Image: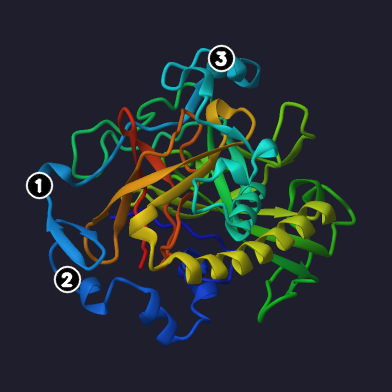
Amino acid sequence: MGLKLTTQQNKKTIEEHANAEYQHENKRSENKIKECSDVTNDHWNIKSENHVFTDQTYVQLKDTDIPLFGNHETQESEDGEADLHKYLVGCKKNPGHRQFIPVDTFNLKHLPEGLQDNDLYEYIKVTADMTVRVSVQVTSPHRPKFWLETTQPYPFYNRSDTRNLRTGSGWVCDVEEYQNGVWQDGYGGTDYKKCWCRPCKDSDSPSNVWWEFYVYTATHVVFDEIEASHTTLRFFYNSDDSPMVTVDNVIAHYVDIESDRCILKCVTCDKHLGNRLKADCKQYWHVKENLYDKYCNTRSKHKFNFIVSHPHGCSKQLSVGQWKDLHNGGHNKTKFTYTTCTCPGSSGARVHSLGWKDWGSAHVHSGSLKPGLNCSSEGGVM
């Protein structure tokens, strides 16, 4: 079973935010879904827990193929921020990082032939804007010894006595603006009427306008409320000389150990940051809608997959590749395997597979299975 955490500050249910992508995309008609989807309702009702599904086909898996838990790719640094560049230069998994593209230099020519599409280019660019570096300073004493129902060691078990910096990646999935406790783009509000960021908590005149946003990452990156309270998010870290834009008031809004998927809740009253994230989020959903229409029927031909992450806790990088298989554990639990390049520091980054519709929860990067093959967290797609 997964560990689920909520806070009294939030009136919305965990499920509402875990299903953010589904809620946004469910506006399309049922006929359009039937036209584009290669997966029927009967597929989702299948009772077996041990299958890989490809388009319109289920293939029996060996028992050893499930569950898929790879070697984690969180970057640990004994000497904190100052040593991260050392790990980048000394990387043994991808020396030279030739398969990574700095997001500031990314252009259409980096995409495969046949996919050099302006909509896809815009989608990747806005995804990069919504990608954050996740830094954690404390390790929870509650981490399990093993991944659930396996004998594979769980990352950073029994390390609560250390204070080594750990970095991963995350992705902003939803942004909400509030004024005097009233949600500006929807219904309802909160019991509190002022911003609850750290500066406002210590201020005699806290802001009455603020933004709350939700960030996907992996549970093995931020395990629980203890770790969340010592977590910092860095935004727009695209190059070594990027300005320092951070948020350090973080709550573990949703944590599921089994799926290796975590949603963090954060707050800011910085108008520049709040408005930019809100605009990026709006643009993301608009472009994503167009891409699904274009590529849902050819997804198994090109198998295009991309990840934006912070390798070794350093500046943001894009990697492109292909998904290999979609492993189905039943009950709408799926995991992608893919060749897309990753490094320590990539754990928790959003995994994007072109032409698939997210169904309830997004996939994030979970770990490395073997050289050249990585795996995602559990999520849902159709």
- The type of residue carrying mark 2 is Ile
Quadrant (top left/top right/bottom left/bottom right) for the C terminus: bottom left
Tell me which amino acid carries mark 1: Lys
Describe residue 239's horizontal placement relative to residue 70 as left or right.
right
Residue of label 2: 46
Q: Which residue is mark 1?
A: 62
Q: Residue at x 22, y 63 (%)?
A: 330
Q: To which quarter of the image does residue 220 belong?
A: top left
Mark number for residue 89? 3
Callouts 1 and 3 close, C-beta under 8 Å: no
Q: Secondary structure at mark 1?
A: loop
Residue occupying the point 43% across, 16% down: 92
- How far is disc 1 from disc 3 in space, using C-alphas? 39 Å
Which residue occupies 47% across, 71% down?
A: 22
Left or right for 306, reference 242: left
Vertical comparison of 111 with 165: above or below: below
User: Where residue 312 sits in the image (x, y, percent)?
Assistant: 54, 26
The picture places residue 112, in percent across and down from the top left corner, at 49, 45
Secondary structure found at label 2: loop
